[in-house]
């Protein structure tokens, strides 16, 4: 072997070492690869032949060229006995060489294969002696490849090859360090540097070098690289030329060992997660300096912090000269301390600081206070980015995971200009109101978990006014501290929309919001449009907003930005966020005019399941084959779901009663429904169907008892983890 890898060591951001690659997305790692090299060929297991008439030695199984022998080389030839004792030694020059044959200037002796002798040729330095000649130009190719397949040098990000070139290797002195020069596009990886150090020769005369690479785990670009048993490994390929400038027949050495790496919120690939996020960030502002607090629960050693931008614009980050360090403006994971962490800057000079102002630990809970400081170029860059192209990750290393404290679109919160006056503030429409506009005013509403709701209101804009954005969100808000975190958000960009001759923005904008309702429901899209009935020409013109949402119930999904007030149940069950003193759920509208935000809020109460104690409810399952009641759902059968609702006091107002039945795989998607209001849309994937017609059957057994029924086909839903069935019954929106 002309080049041998002696050992490889990996050092993480906190100086912890391993003999294999172990990191999470965003983590930097120093890799030290010790190699030894010699230009050598032996007759052992390679029976050479000698033509004394031409002084040509033929090597049947090992290539002279691949081993590094070149015309003009001085070679040390050593003849050994079967016991390894030197019989004779001499120097000779290479006058011709190809893969099979090497012609020497002199060959005074040859080995006797019958007696077990063997011969060794080594290319040596021109100064004489026996010191092996060092190879010269070297290229190092570095890549992150998938664990499950044979590695290669082609980037998973954009197919580029990240190459670092070294010249003058032959003349390096012991202790000298060369820094590799990046060749070609570097957008395939996050590579800080690649260096080469000349070490002292080994005791047996081999040349020894150390390759040092500082590489950042590139996994931030794609979570799918870490699905199941898959993860990223480090692939390194060395191409070492025998002589300087030689573009061919470079000798290769490769590192392609499996690794133990993970995405964000993962404990590498095979470890058990030993930390969790207590409090993340609701928003992160790209326009101005903002102060934030993050809390994590886990080991108090090996803490770190980092951040990066991930663009969706292929032209920005793929197949470009700059590395991903530049494009992402990354702060790779750094040891957590009171410090100012400065990001890389992109080609526009955009960047930011993560200025940690305080770190405190109580028990296993670590609190991090910091300022996020974008520079002016960062503001300009993000302002010009397309909607949906401001994705930013900010993480805290705790234990064996990089916990995402923020994984969302950066926003720009302009100064508050005042309230947004509403011409009509109807408020919230419930499931029974399958319409996109309505008249009237009301403040606040009370609804129930899983209810589909829509806000409707009207306001006015000034003709020729300078409007740039309209934002609608559902947020949790603390009325005492004014803290908030966003649960759902939609932004309408008004810049660039057509404007009439009288200065009226031609609004007719639609954005998809809700996808889990039947197609016959109108509560799918947010609609921002002109409302001529509210015009006050020539000063103002009317606009309406329709904003649908479903009161989220999915407790098994994490709400990263939730306040630590709700620890440890910071999940996507919204009901908890208005079930604590000073906290409430509300809709917030923001209209940006002349760089100022004009806002309107409207509170909504999210009631828990079984909220009305005056109603006794039960759900039963009936097999259609024999009309028997069952407690266990058989697979592949058609059944009837029967939900009974009895008023304990008073009677049902039959003309106002409506309801729905829903089903979903336990702690999974998708949720299906049939309703007495929204007609069945004939979706053949829906496991629920009406008994007859397009609606849930509503049967009033008496003035106090009502039964809803529908079919349930268990072959159309995953039963492996069980199912969850809910039944809602209401009089308008007064009862659960």
Image (cartoon, rainbow, N blue to C red):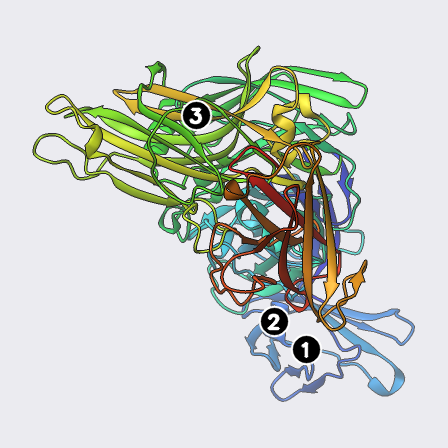
User: Where is residue 81 drawn, in percent x and y?
Assistant: 87, 75
Q: Earlier in the sequence, mark 3 or mark 2?
A: 2
Q: Are marks 3 and 2 in contact (CB under 8 Å)?
A: no
Residue tagged by mark 3?
A: 588
Image point (43%, 45%), residue name = 523
Q: Which mark is residue 322?
A: none
Image point (74%, 55%), residue name = 620
Residue tagged by mark 2?
A: 66
User: Where is residue 555 drawn, in percent x and y?
Assistant: 67, 39
Q: CA distance from mark 3 to mark 2?
A: 70 Å
Q: Is residue 651 above or below residue 210?
A: above
Q: Are marks 1 and 2 in contact (CB under 8 Å)?
A: yes
User: Where is residue 621 drawn, in percent x and y?
Assistant: 74, 59
Q: Residue furthest left?
A: 501
User: Closer to the camera: disc 3 or disc 2?
Assistant: 3
Q: Is residue 673 visible?
A: yes
Residue tagged by mark 1?
A: 62
Q: Is residue 559 above or below residue 187?
A: above
């Amino acid at each position: 072997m002309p080049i041998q890898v002696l050992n490889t060591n990996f050092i993480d951001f906190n100086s912890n070492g391993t003999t294999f690659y172990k990191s999470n997305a965003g983590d930097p790692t120093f890799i030290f690869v010790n190699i030894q090299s010699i230009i050598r060929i032996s007759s052992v297991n390679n029976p050479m032949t000698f033509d004394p008439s031409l002084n040509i030695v033929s090597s049947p199984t090992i290539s002279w060229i691949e081993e590094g022998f070149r015309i003009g080389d001085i070679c040390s030839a050593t003849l050994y006995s079967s016991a390894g004792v030197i019989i004779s030694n001499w120097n000779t020059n290479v006058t011709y060489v190809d893969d099979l044959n090497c012609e020497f200037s002199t060959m005074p002796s040859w080995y006797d294969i019958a007696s077990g002798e063997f011969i060794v040729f080594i290319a040596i330095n021109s100064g004489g002696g026996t010191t092996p000649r060092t190879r010269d130009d070297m290229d190092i190719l570095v890549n992150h490849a998938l664990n499950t397949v044979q590695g290669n040098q082609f980037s998973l990000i954009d197919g580029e090859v990240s190459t670092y070139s070294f010249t003058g290797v032959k003349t390096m002195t012991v202790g000298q360090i060369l820094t590799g020069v990046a060749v070609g596009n570097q957008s395939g990886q996050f590579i800080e540097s690649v260096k080469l150090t000349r070490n002292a020769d080994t005791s047996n005369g081999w040349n020894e070098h150390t390759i040092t690479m500082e590489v950042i785990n590139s996994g931030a670009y794609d979570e799918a690289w870490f699905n199941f048993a898959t993860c990223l490994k480090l692939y390194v390929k060395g191409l070492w030329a025998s002589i300087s400038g030689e573009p061919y027949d470079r000798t290769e050495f490769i590192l392609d060992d499996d690794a133990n790496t993970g995405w964000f919120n993962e404990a590498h690939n095979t470890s058990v997660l030993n930390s969790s996020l207590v409090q993340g960030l609701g928003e992160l502002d790209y326009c101005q300096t903002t102060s934030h607090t993050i809390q994590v629960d886990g080991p108090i050693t090996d803490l770190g912090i980092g951040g990066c931008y991930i663009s969706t614009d292929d032209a920005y980050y793929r197949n470009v000269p700059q590395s991903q360090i530049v494009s992402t403006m990354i702060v790779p994971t750094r040891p957590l301390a009171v410090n100012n962490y400065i990001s890389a800057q992109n080609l526009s000079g955009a960047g930011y600081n993560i200025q940690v102002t305080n770190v405190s630990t109580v028990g296993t809970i670590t609190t991090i206070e910091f300022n996020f400081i974008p520079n002016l170029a960062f503001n300009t860059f993000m302002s010009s980015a397309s909607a949906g192209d401001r994705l930013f990750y900010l993480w805290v290393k705790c234990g064996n995971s990089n916990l995402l404290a923020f994984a969302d679109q950066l926003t720009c919160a302009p100064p508050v200009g005042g309230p947004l006056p509403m011409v009509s503030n109807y408020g919230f429409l419930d499931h029974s109101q399958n319409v996109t506009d309505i008249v009237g005013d009301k403040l606040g509403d009370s609804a129930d978990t899983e209810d589909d709701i829509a806000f409707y209101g009207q306001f006015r804009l000034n003709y020729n006014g300078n409007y740039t954005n309209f934002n609608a969100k559902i947020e949790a808000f603390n009325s005492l501290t004014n803290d908030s975190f966003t649960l759902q958000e939609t932004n309408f960009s008004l810049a660039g929309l057509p404007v009439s001759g009288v200065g009226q923005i031609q609004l007719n904008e639609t954005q998809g919001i809700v996808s889990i309702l039947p197609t016959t429901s109108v509560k799918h899209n947010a609609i921002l449009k002109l409302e001529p009935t509210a015009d006050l020409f020539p000063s103002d013109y009317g606009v309406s907003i329709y904003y649908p949402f479903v009161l989220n119930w999915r407790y098994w999904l994490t709400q990263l930005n939730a306040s630590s007030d709700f620890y440890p149940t910071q999940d996507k069950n919204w009901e908890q966020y208005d079930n604590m003193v000073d906290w409430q759920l509300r809709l917030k509208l923001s209209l940006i005019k002349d760089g100022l935000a004009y806002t309107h809020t409207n509170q909504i109460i999210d009631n828990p399941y079984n909220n009305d104690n005056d109603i006794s409810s039960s759900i039963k399952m009936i097999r259609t084959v024999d009309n028997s009641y069952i407690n266990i759902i058989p697979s592949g059968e058609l059944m009837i779901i029967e939900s009974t609702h009895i008023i304990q006091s008073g009677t049902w107002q039959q003309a106002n009663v409506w309801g729905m039945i829903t089903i979903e795989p336990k702690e999974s998607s998708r949720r299906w429904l049939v309703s007495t209001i929204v007609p069945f849309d004939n979706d053949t994937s829906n496991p629920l169907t009406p008994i007859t017609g397009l609606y849930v059957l509503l049967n009033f057994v008496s003035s106090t008892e009502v039964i809803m029924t529908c079919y349930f086909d268990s072959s159309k839903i995953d039963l492996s983890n069980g199912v969850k069935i809910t039944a809602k019954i209401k009089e308008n929106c007064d009862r659960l």
